[in-house]
Structure formats: structure tokens, C-alpha cells
Amino acid sequence: MDTKDEVEKRPTTGNASPKEGIVQLTTREMTKDEHHLATLGYKQVFIRSFGMFENWAATFTTMNFVSGLPVLFGFAMYTGGPQAAFSNWAYVLGGQDHGPLLAWLTAWYNWAGWLTIVPGIAQGNTNFFVSMLEILYPNAAVLKEGSFAWCISALTIILAAIPNCVSQWTIRHMLRGTVYTTVVLMAFYFIWFPIAASRRGGFQPASIMTTFYNGINTAVDSERNTIVQASDSYCWVVGVLFGAWEFYGYDASVHLAEETLSASTVVANGMWTGSISTWLLSVLTLIMVLFCMQDFMGIVNGTYPNNWAEYLKQLVGRRGAAAILAFTWIDGLLCTGVIFLSAQRITYAVARDGILPFSKTFSKVTPKHHLPVNAALLMVVLTIAICAAVIGSTVAFSAITAAATIGTNLSYLIPIVARQTVGRKHFRPAKWNLGAWSIPVSIIASLYIAFLFVVLMLPQLYPVNAQTLNYAPIVIGGITAIALGGWFFPFSLGARYWFEGPKRTITEVELVGVQVKGCE
């Protein structure tokens, strides 16, 4: 007789009909999680073993502020300085007829968004590693080579993919490991930083919170005076990327829903608690970082791949900076693994619904551990290729981060708007829902995402030329063209002729008489 845990973790057995792709069940017993998933049209494939901690950790570590904050710290300092950085960071948390098209677009934007997040995180992490090496070996010419940085980014992605292709055990410990490294880095920030600041130049006065700096105008006249093409207001608005980049990915908990016990409540709980805890702790961390800053203009004018290195060197010295950067790289590596986990699961999900080319291949899971390894291999190849376009270009890196933020937020916007419009009559709220707050929250979220969409398309440096152009509009335009082209393609090949939304892998008839047992 199977124990309760064995029943919960064991995927339902079945055989697929070669004609319809419908699973014929050979068992009449399901857990509540499994049955709920079946009512949505999907057979249980993944092994359910994650609890509240792992689900919370997925969102918390994806938003990973301890290494995420430093990724764009230098960017934030020249796009408004401390004032804009703090304001934008705190401000962030604040149908049948149309269903197939909306599902198609949502899937493409979300998949493309997470596809670009992985190389963005990997490149940001590489900048930590290379900056550490430049501090230790300032005369090493190889550190300036784009190919060297690309190799580090590629290695980061490969290492991040490995635990996601082995077993649930390695994934669980990866999630927990990221939480542990986050705690250690927070200890550095809240213990080491203030001690070091008190022994060096002291703390910044309260006025640091209102210090503003416009550094996006790079042109100078014959007398070396800056030519102002972008106003201070424009600069402040562009700086919103700093906060928006960190607060993407709060849906990471959802990507583990099919592997989480009591998913209908735990997933929503994990998303909310992960987002709120990240916001509270990150605001406190940013305040500490700003007050411990030593030389603001020295950071702005720093020459490292990531000027967080300049901040650290001023505060804790060369060796201390190298040590923190090394540990930040380890934390960022684990964070990349968690983000890769979400990207891998999204790739599997959209392939399962037939949205990607060669979907049958990328929707397969391994027989023993039920992991989508083929989806992981696709992500490895694509993300390493994207890194090749990012290496050595600060503007390209900012464009990738902006494109990732836009893509994921557009995928959030579509269901938010659909929920309150075309889907309002037939939408059934889950156990965890906003209730009467649904409409006002949806309006605020929609307006904010629309604001982000416009702002993140704007140039981030002036004058605008091939070297300073924000390529985010080109990236998003390309994604949109692929999605709409795939939908409207003629000759009965376009998705509008055959895509009807999520593909059912289990029928309602097969659920009749099923005995439901479970953990909820």
C-alpha cells in the first residue's frame, strides 16, 4: 500500500492516444492537486515535492535583491543618482472569442521575456566576476576582451542549467542555497558596511537621499561643457529601469505550481510573501548602501564593468571588495539557476501547448525524474547566443534588461486586462484572490505597466547614435513580429487556423468516478 507522500509524488500513469494526444488513465486515484490540474485539462507530469519554503524561495531568490541591486547600481547613479534610485525602487510595489490570440501573445511575450532575463542575469553576474579580477589584476589585458567575458557568461549559464536537469533534490537545494547566500550578503551589507564606513570617510548625510545627478548627456562642446539634450525630469524617468529590473519575476512561484504541494493556496502565498519580503528588505538594504557610500562621483566615473566594484573598493578596500564580489558571483550563479528554472518550465509549458516550433521535442520530460531537459538544452543554446550580442556593450546590456522587463510585464498585462474585460463574466477566482480589490489593483497595475512600456523604450544616453541607441524597441518589435507573424501566417499554417489555447492532455470524461485524496 502506497504511503500518502508516495501517492502525492507519483505522476498519474497513462497512455497517450496517437491521434488525439489524450491520456487514457489506468488509475482512479488522484491527489487534490492532481485532480485540480486535471480539471484544467492537464495530466500530472512533474513530481510534486516542493512546499511553502521552496515556492516562496522561487520568487524571493528570482527577485534576489542582494545581487540584483548591484547589477544596475552604476546605471542608477548616472540616471538620477540616489534620489531617483530610491524613489523608483520604493514605487514599484505600490472568452472564448479572444482567448486563443491572447494566450498566444501572452505565451510569446512571457517566454521571450524570460529568455532574455537569463542572459541578462548571467551577464550581470559576469560583470561582478570580471570586476573582481580587474581589482586583483589591473594590468591583465585579457580581462578587457569581450570573448573572455562571453566565456564566463556561457559557463555561468551551463552551471545554472545543471541542477535543473538532475533531480528535484538538486533543485530544492539550489533554492535553499540561494536563500542562504542572500542572508550572508545581507550580513555583509548591514554589519561590515557600516563598520567600514565608520572607519573610513564616515556616513553620508541625510541629504544623500535627495542627491540628483543627470549623467545621460555624454556630448560636450568645444570647451568641454556638457551639452544638455535630456532634461533632469527625463533622466529621472529613465532611471525607473533600476527598480523595474529588480521587481520582475514575482510570478516565479507560479512556474513551480505543478511541482508544489497544495498549489492552489501555496503558490499565491509564495508569490505574495516573496514579493513583500523582497520589497521590505531591499528598501532597507538600499538605504544602508546609500548612507555608506564614500565618493559618489568616483562611482559615477568608475571604469569597472560594474561600478559596484568601485563602491566596494572605496568602502572595504581592494581585498574586501574582491571577496564580496566573489561571494556575490556565487550568489548570482545560484540566482541564475533559479531564473533558469523558471525559463525552463515556461519553455516546457508553451511547447506543451504547441506554441514553439518542434514543440513535441521540447515538451518531453525525462522518464526517471520527470524533468524537461530538452527545454533546458534549448534555453542554454539560445541564451548563450544572446550573450554574444551583449558582451562588451553597456548599452546592449541595458537594452536586454529593458527588453526582459518589458516582455515579462506585457505578459502580465494581457491577462490582467482580459480578466476585467472579455473574461470578466466567466472567470472563476481561485481560493486566494483579491476580492473587491481586484478592479482597482488591476487598473493601477495596467497603468504602471503601460508607463514602463513607454519609458523603457526611450534612449538611455544622449546623443543617440549606433553606440548609444536603446535596442529594446527593436527586440520587442522583433518578438511582436514573430508572434503576430506566426498567428496570421497564410495558407492555413498560421496559429489562427489551429491554435485553440492550452492543449488538453486529459478529458473530463476520464475524471468521472476518480477518487480524490490529497494534501489540501
Image (tube, rainbow, N blue to C red):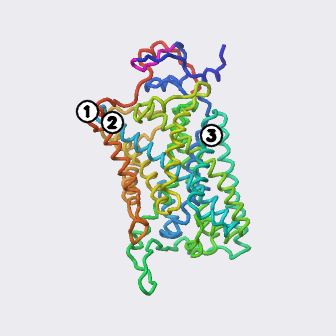
Q: Position of residue 283 (x, y in %)?
A: 57, 59
Camera-side residue of 440 and 469: 469
For mark 3, give the secondary structure: helix
**Number of other residues with Cα within 10 Å of mark 3, as a class: few under 14, some 14 to 19, many 20 or more:** some
Looking at the rendered structure, the kind of residue marked 2 is: Gly
State yes or no: residue 24 in magenta: yes
Instruction: Identify the magenta region.
Output: 19-25
Q: In the structure shown, which secondary structural element does the residue marked by tag 1 occupy?
A: loop
Determine the residue positioned at 36% across, 41% down.
105
Q: Which residue is mark 3?
A: 162
Q: CA distance from mark 2 to mark 1?
A: 30 Å
Q: Which residue is mark 1?
A: 491
Q: CA distance from mark 1 to mark 3?
A: 41 Å
Q: Quadrant of the C terminus?
A: top right
| Mark 1 neighbour density, 10 Å: few (under 14) some (14–19) many (20 or more) | few
- Tell me if residue 119 comes above or below residue 347 in the rendering: below
Q: Residues within 10 Å of mark 2 (few under 14, many from 20)?
A: some
State the quadrant of the N terminus: top right
Q: Position of residue 342 (x, y in %)?
A: 53, 41
Give me the disc on residue 423. Answer: 2
Residue displayed at 41% across by 18% down: 508
Percent x, y for residue 238? 43, 64
**Viewer-side residue, 172 vs 131:** 131
Which disc, if any, is residue 82? none
Horizontal arrangement in the rendering, residue 43 relative to residue 198 (left or right):
left
Residue at (65%, 47%) from the top-left corner? 178
* Amino acid of disc 3: Ile
Give the Cα separation between the discs numbered 2 and 3: 40 Å
- Left or right of residue 110: residue 65: right
